Image (cartoon, rainbow, N blue to C red):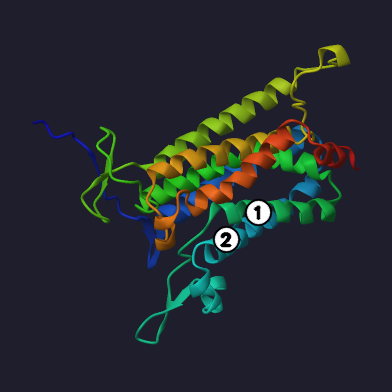
Amino acid sequence: MTIPAYILWNPDIVAFSLGPIEVRWYSLLWCIGLFAVYQLMHYLFKEQKLGEDKFEPMFVYCFLGILIGARLGHCLFYEPEYFLSHPVEMFLPIRKFADGEWHFTGYEGLASHGGTLGLMLAIVLYSRKVKLNLMHVLDNVAIVTPICACAIRLGNLMNSEIIGRPTDVPWAFIFERVDMQPRHPGQLYEALCYAVFFFIGWAIYRRSLDIKGVNKDNKPLFDISVGSGFYFGLCIFLIFLSRIFIEFTKENQVDFESSMTFNMGQLLSVPFVLLGLYCMFGGKYCKNLGEYK
């Protein structure tokens, strides 16, 4: 019997060192994703003539919204009992070990659903601050966000975390730091999906620039103009629908999920999928926000 040549996976989590400072792949890929989003958003702001002065504050709002939302999302959705009794560890990247000493651990646990909610709230605050149309900003952010999500999942892959279930598919990964079982590379599935979603959204956006003066009798099924809510809806619909299916290939993140038919990630994804459909099809509130100046 021929044993499949599975992919042995055990990369060093440290990308490089600068003296005593270690730069890990996860942090590096986070930064690469954020840098790509920053550059692409800057391009969109220039192309749409939204104002250089209004662009600059956006990065800080979004970065803090994602980080705080992702951290709180993990703590409250997945480990509420522990973190509500250890609130310091919820907000600071430290943990108190059995020896009674505090140790720096970094933020061990970030939830994409919480990060999405944090980002949405940050954009609301940002839009009010700089007086830009909320749906216009949400659409622009949605066009570029999947490329950052792709980079973050590649960081999870380099960390050998959020691993998949055991499988015998020929492309299975053996995460040597975890065990020697061939498993689905769930992180890679998500990263590839997000990369494809970015190119889909970008291609539709470029196409929308060529659509001029569509009359009422020839109105398309979707209003794909920036500010309609279409791109925001498309982004969260594709990302969280794919998440529902990919979760079937992944191990549960916390013990209580083992008794659930659908895990926490899948349940939390459903409202985002529905919201995405609502926005794509031009829901009433999306139209109102899109018309508000």
Extreme residue toward the right, this view = 293
Q: Which numbered dot is residue 117?
A: 1
Q: Closer to the camera, 285 or 206?
A: 285
Compare marks 2 and 1 and give the one earlier in the sequence: 2
Q: Closer to the camera, 223 or 250?
A: 250
Does dot 2 land on a helix, a strand or a loop? Answer: helix
Question: 17 left or right of 125?
Answer: left
Give the x, y percent position of residue 237. 62, 37
**Does residue 41 appear in this view?**
no
Q: How many marks?
A: 2
Question: 31 left or right of 102?
Answer: right
Quadrant for the C terminus, please.
top right
Give the x, y percent position of residue 177. 26, 56
In the displayed structure, would residue 124 be above or below residue 97?
A: above
Q: Residues within 10 Å of mark 2 (few under 14, many from 20)?
A: many
**Does residue 240 appear in this view?**
yes
Residue at the spot 50% in from the left edge and 62% down from the top edge: 78
Residue at the spot 73% in from the left edge and 22% down from the top edge: 208
User: CB atoms at circles 2 and 1 under 8 Å apart?
Assistant: yes
Give the x, y percent position of residue 195. 51, 34
Extreme residue toward the top, this view = 217
Instruction: Name the residue tied to disc 2.
Output: 73
Q: Closer to the camera, 75 or 37?
A: 75
Give the x, y percent position of residue 12. 30, 54
Does dot 1 land on a helix, a strand or a loop? Answer: helix
